[in-house]
Amino acid sequence: MNPKYITISFAFFALAFLPLFLTAQDYQLYEGDTVNKRVDGMRQGKWIYFGKDKNNPAYAPDAKVEEGEYANNRKNGLWIKYFPSGKLESEITYKSNRPNGEYKIYYENGQLQEHGIWKNNRNMGHFERNYENGNPQQKFEFASNGKRDGKQEYYYESGAIMIEADIQQGREVGQVKEYHEDGSVKSIKVYDEPGVINTEKSTFAQPPEDPALAQKEPEIEVVDVSVEAKVEEHETQNQAAKKDNPFKGDGEATLYRKDKQISKKGFFKNYKLIEGMWYKYDDNGILIQVMRFKKGRYVGDAPMENDKASSQ
């Protein structure tokens, strides 16, 4: 038996008052600390999940997968997740079982991949995403309603600036400057009103003559129009909508995941999303993509503004 890891189960009786009270507990000892405690069937306090708990062959049986605090069976406070190698994968703050607060996600080489603040199912404040080499990829500012607001910057993997823009409530204002990787200006787009470009005032430079520089320009994403968004078994309406107008596979609907975050929203036909949005999340419940559908096919991504990303 591993001396660091001992499981203990017992029931203790409180005789101070009548009738007799019984409180059932079980817990484990790990390196001298009490962990993985259940009180009346509910997880409480410090918990550590190991490879054998997750049934994941990528982890050794005694390797840590994640650890953090529970309160009445819900994740609360900082939770730390590890790669199978034992290196840090993420640090995410939870409140009542949902990501809420500062979070950090790492590459396995130790470089910070993403850092931001997640509250009410949306990003708030400063957000940054980096390349695996540690150079910045994106730097955004988010308003409290989840819309991008303020200075926004995109970078090449080399660290050179790609795009710099000012955004107000998700819309471009003033000038949006785009650069080649050598630092020369590629275009300057002028917005007289939020989101409305003035083509007469805007300038667009010719691409650089150096073919090596031209090859380094970011590739345009090719949209896979074969992707379909079908309703999955775990997706449901919120309770009010389910009672008043139960979803039967056709018409307007908003569907939610088990954690009550929005999954799909729009017009459905035969349980397939025809017009609307498909919200994609990572394993930690953080929104990573909003896919837009038209005529039953994926046509591109929508801004991740998360105005109404959860059921009430």
Image (spheres, rainbow, N blue to C red):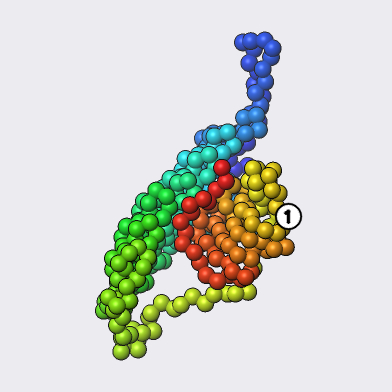
Residue 46: percent from left, percent from top? 52, 37
Q: Does any portion of residue 159 appear in the rendered image? A: no
Whole-percent x, y for residue 51 in the image: 60, 51
Q: At 54% from the left edge and 75% from the top edge, which residue is drawn? A: 223
The residue positioned 55% from the left and 65% from the top of the image is 292
Above or below: residue 274 compared with residue 74: below
Quarter of the image where the C terminus is located:
top right
The quadrant holding residue 274 is bottom right
Q: Which SS class for mark 1?
A: loop
Q: Which residue is mark 1?
A: 248
Which percent across, then down, holds residue 86?
Answer: 50, 54
**In the visual, does 118 lie left or right of 74?**
left
Q: Nearer the viewer, residue 180 or 43?
A: 180
Q: Nearer the viewer, residue 80 or 197?
A: 197
Task: Indicate the amino acid at tag 1.
Answer: Lys
Relative depth, front residue between 96 and 64: 96
In the displayed structure, 36 sits above or below 138; it is above
Give the residue displayed 63% in from the left and 10% down from the top.
Answer: 17
- Position of residue 64 measured from the top left corner of the image (x, y, whole percent): 54, 49
Q: Quadrant of the N terminus?
A: top right
Instruction: Using the image, determine if residue 42 lies above or below residue 97.
Output: above
